[in-house]
Image (cartoon, grey):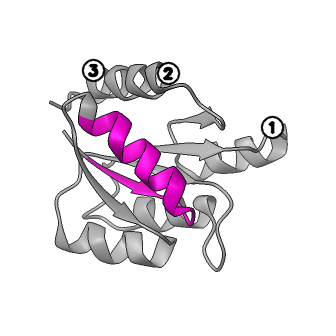
Amino acid sequence: MKILTVDDSKVVRLTIALTLKQAGHSVVEAESGEDALKLLRSEKVDLVISDFNMPRMDGSQLVRAIKQDPDLRAIPVIMLTTEHARKRLDEAREAGAVGWIHKPFKSEQLVAAVKKLAEKFGIS
């Protein structure tokens, strides 16, 4: 499975990439919502894992942009966040996110969430 990770923190992107590559996935990275959209239009990606709080385009705005694009809307998006406020999490869900993982996360938790979504959405 090819997964796009979007986070303005290079350390977080590298941690996610390492974890998912060890689990057998292909990973591409973007440091902003804008970069993620450009990448999604040039590469086939099966799943997006995005940070919630990013400058210029936050995670909810990215999800909304993905879901409004007919060529991208079928791609599931998981939010990776430090947010615990119900309102913010509901905002992401309403935008189209299919779930979230709270930071800091355990590697096993991330891999399990990806596996669960792959099964749910028929992604191999």
Residue identifier under label 2: 109
Residue identifier under label 3: 119
Task: Please give the name of the residue rendered at 35% of the width and 68% of the height, measured from the top-left corner.
Answer: 69
Give percent across and percent down for residue 62. 52, 65
Task: Please give the name of the residue rendered at 32% of the width and 49% of the height, measured from the top-left corner.
Answer: 75
Tell me the CA gap for discs 2 and 3: 15 Å
Task: Please give the name of the residue rendered at 43% of the width and 43% of the height, measured from the top-left corner.
Answer: 16
Give percent across and percent down for residue 106. 54, 25
Give percent across and percent down for residue 113. 44, 25
Q: In this rendering, which labeled residue sits more in front, label 2 or label 3?
A: 2
Q: Is residue 48 magenta?
A: no
| Quarter containing the C terminus | top left
Residues under numbered marks 1 and 2 in contact, where contact means CB atoms less than 8 Å apart = no
Whether residue 99 is visible here, answered yes or no, is: yes
Whether residue 76 is visible here, answered yes or no, is: no
Task: Identify the secondary structure beneath mark 3.
Answer: helix
Provide the residue span drawn in magenta.
3-21
In the rendered view, does 58 fall on the left or right side of 48?
right
Residue identifier under label 1: 84
Q: Is residue 55 above or below residue 116?
A: below
In the rendered view, does 88 fall on the left or right side of 56?
right
- Circle 2 packing at 10 Å, graded few (<14), some (14-19), many (20+), is few
Residue type, label 3: Glu
